[in-house]
Amino acid sequence: MEKSRTESDHFWSKRGQFFPFRRPLNVSIYQDVITDALRHEYGGKRNAAKELARRLLKSPHTVRNWLRGTSTPRGEELLRLMVECKPLREKINQFIEENQQCSGE
């Protein structure tokens, strides 16, 4: 049974233009994809947060939060992580492909 579209399925721009949401991105899915990939690659390493933080020019505290899943990287941080972590890059690409197939592109 398909849910009828309501105004909550849309948003208003600052200029007053009305746009429908394409497909809402579930934040927990995004967080799970990143956390799973990072744990797969770095989870067993004792100093993983410190090593990765050094390479990304971030604090170990920030990287530990990503590994725990309590926060997620922002745009530039995500791009740097994708360069450093092949499993993350693969998961993100898989996620993109699945969402393109679902939206019919």
Image (tube, grey):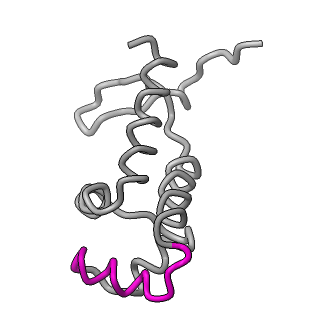
> Does the magenta segment cover residue 45?
yes
Q: Is residue 75 above or below residue 99?
A: below
Image coordinates of residue 60 in percent, x first then y, are 38, 86
> Does the magenta segment cover residue 97?
no
Residue placed most toward the observer, 36 or 30? 36
Stretch in magenta: 43-57
Residue placed most toward the observer, 23 or 90? 90
Residue placed most toward the observer, 92 or 40? 40
Image coordinates of residue 3 in percent, x first then y, are 69, 18
Taking the image as shown, residue 93 lies to the left or right of residue 77, namely right
Label count reads 0
What is the quadrant of the C terminus in the image? Answer: top left
Q: Is residue 4 above or below residue 59?
A: above
Name the residue at 32% across, 86% down: 59
Residue placed most toward the observer, 9 or 86? 86
Taking the image as shown, residue 7 lies to the left or right of residue 96, namely right
What is the quadrant of the N terminus in the image? Answer: top right
Quadrant location of residue 72?
bottom left
Name the residue at 29% across, 26% down: 17
Quadrant location of residue 15?
top left
Image coordinates of residue 102 in percent, x first then y, are 51, 19
Q: Is the magenta stretch mostly helix, strand or loop?
A: helix
Image coordinates of residue 58 in percent, x first then y, are 28, 80
